Amino acid sequence: DAGVIQSPRHEVTEMGQEVTLRCKPISGHDYLFWYRQTMMRGLELLIYFNNNVPIDDSGMPEDRFSAKMPNASFSTLKIQPSEPRDSAVYFCASSLIQGGSYGYTFGSGTRLTVV
Amino acid sequence: AQSVAQPEDQVNVAEGNPLTVKCTYSVSGNPYLFWYVQYPNRGLQFLLKYITGDNLVKGSYGFEAEFNKSQTSFHLKKPSALVSDSALYFCAVRDIGTDKLIFGTGTRLQVFP
């Protein structure tokens, strides 16, 4: 398996533009997580899915952020409109059904810069 | 609520010396504990975990961690540090209610030649 795949690796966009980050989890993993990492706030859980259903989105900072998982092999995180304070590295992770016992597999992340 | 604490933002050690990265936890019930490493411009990578059994857990890249129930600690150790071990290290604990992982704030390890 190629692991968790995220695209793009880097994204530079202008303030006000829509940004879409993509994630392909490991086949067979039932949980998918979106994290954001910044120097100031560290690693933050934004939202997670179980069997394609959003379970907890309490970490999503604002209504400008939305996430979907239309099927077991694809998820998106969208920011509309984007702002400079959204600049961060966004990670996707997936895990087996008992995620807390097996741990997570992380993707390489998308570095987002909003200018 | 379950939580982990990493009391050191940064640990500096000379190459060849033993290293320790500290983690303490707070859980109700038996803890499931993890260590992850993040190299520059990469995602977090699994190093090792403790679920049950021996208190000394061996993991990837020569790392090990010691589970100490009385001190509620799960420190990461390596007998001889390498410059290539320089990275950000995260401790994590399973939240029993939701089964998701709760991550610490991370400790930056710097190994000097």
Image (tube, grey):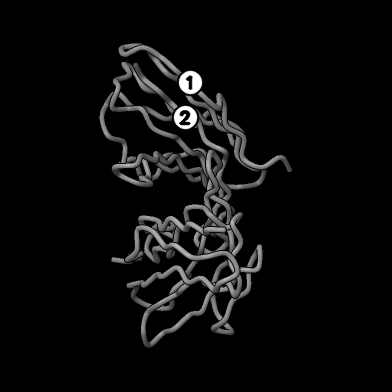
Instruction: Kindly identify which chain the residue marked by label 1 belongs to.
Output: A
- The location of residue A65, given as percent across then percent down, is 33, 27
Q: Could you tell me if the residues under marks 1 and 2 are in contact, i.e. CB atoms within 8 Å? A: yes
Taking depth in this image into account, of A3 and B81 the one nearest to the observer is B81
Taking depth in this image into account, of A36 and A34 the one nearest to the observer is A36
Outermost front residue? B113
- The location of residue A75, given as percent across then percent down, is 52, 31
* Helix, strand or loop status at disc 2: strand
The image quadrant where one finds the C terminus of chain B is: bottom right
Question: Which residue position holds label 1?
Answer: A11
Give me the residue at 59% from left, 53% from top: A96
Residue neighbourhood size for the residue with mark 2, other residues' Cα within 10 Å, grouped as few (<14), some (14–19), many (≥20): many
* Helix, strand or loop status at disc 1: strand
In the rendered image, the vertical position of residue A57 relative to residue B93, given as above or below: above
* Spatial separation of the CA atoms under disc 1 and disc 2: 6 Å
Name the N-terminal-most of marks 1 and 2: 1
Q: Is residue B91 shown left or right of residue B50?
A: left
Question: Which residue position holds label 2?
Answer: A111
